[in-house]
Image (cartoon, rainbow, N blue to C red):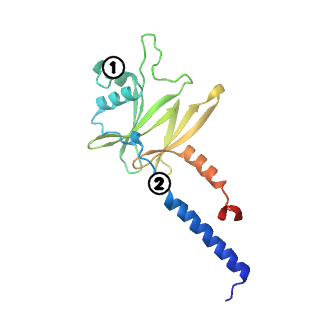
């Protein structure tokens, strides 16, 4: 089978475009290590609430009275991922004498911390922001549908997936993938 000149030109151009794309990918420096991912393994609930208190700047992780107040007023949902491993979703709460929250943001959203429990302790998978969530395991992964308050009273849903080592923001991932799809290779960008 003989290929026409035009066919050879198209094949050569496609090879150049592919080679250029591969070279750009290989030339990319490795992603920097996110220091927040260097979360220590937390032995028990006291350490978990100490970590949360320090992360939210509520006080010292060593303040036993603060940790006790935070622990008793917060809620912990005991869930499981598709492998049956224990996943804890913690909604911290700390009220002042008048009953006002020190944790809730002005827009009404709360931080939610998601941990995986192992025989060695609790490992932080990630953090979500919102008012509340429902969850499912229909896709085999534990999925959180977080209700988030937006400006002007508008609410939206942000989806998160519990992965083996991370909490993945599926809504943000989908947004980034749509943005990446807008880049269409042309003859001008190929050379």
Residues at marks 2 and 1, CA–CA distance in whole angstroms: 43 Å
Residue 98 coordinates in the image, percent (x, y): 45, 10
Residue 132 coordinates in the image, percent (x, y): 51, 32
Which of disc 1 and disc 2 is earlier in sequence? 2
Q: In the rendered image, which residue does mark 2 sit on?
A: 29
The answer to whether 72 appears left or right of 30 in the picture is: left
- Mark 2 surroundings: few (<14), some (14-19) or many (≥20) residues within 10 A: few
- Mark 1 surroundings: few (<14), some (14-19) or many (≥20) residues within 10 A: some
The answer to whether 58 appears left or right of 44 in the picture is: right
Farthest residue to the front: give it: 191
Above or below: residue 121 compared with residue 150: below
Q: Residue at x 56, y 39 (%)?
A: 158
Where, by quadrant of the figure, is residue 75 drawn?
top left
Mark 2 residue element: loop
Q: Residue at x 33, y 28 (%)?
A: 50
The answer to whether 67 appears left or right of 157 in the picture is: left
Q: Residue at x 29, y 29 (%)?
A: 46
Residue 128 coordinates in the image, percent (x, y): 48, 36
Q: In the rendered image, which residue does mark 1 sit on?
A: 66
Above or below: residue 130 compared with residue 97: below
């Amino acid at each position: 089978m003989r290929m026409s000149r035009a066919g050879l030109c198209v094949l050569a151009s496609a090879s150049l475009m592919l080679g250029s794309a591969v070279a750009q990918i290989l030339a990319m420096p490795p992603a920097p290590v996110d220091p927040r991912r260097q979360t220590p393994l937390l032995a028990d609930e006291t350490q978990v609430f100490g970590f949360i208190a320090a992360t939210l700047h509520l006080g010292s992780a060593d303040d036993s009275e603060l940790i006790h107040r935070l622990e008793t007023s917060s809620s912990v949902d005991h869930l499981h991922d598709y492998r049956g491993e224990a996943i804890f979703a913690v909604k911290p709460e700390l009220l002042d004498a008048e009953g006002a929250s020190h944790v809730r943001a002005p827009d009404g959203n709360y931080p939610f911390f998601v941990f995986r429990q192992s025989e060695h302790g609790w490992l932080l998978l990630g953090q979500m922001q919102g008012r509340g969530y429902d969850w499912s395991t229909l896709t085999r992964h534990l999925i959180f549908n977080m209700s988030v308050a937006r400006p002007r009273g508008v609410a939206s849903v942000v989806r998160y997936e519990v992965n083996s080592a991370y909490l993945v923001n599926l809504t943000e991932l989908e947004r980034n993938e749509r943005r990446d799809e807008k880049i269409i290779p042309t003859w001008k960008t190929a050379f």
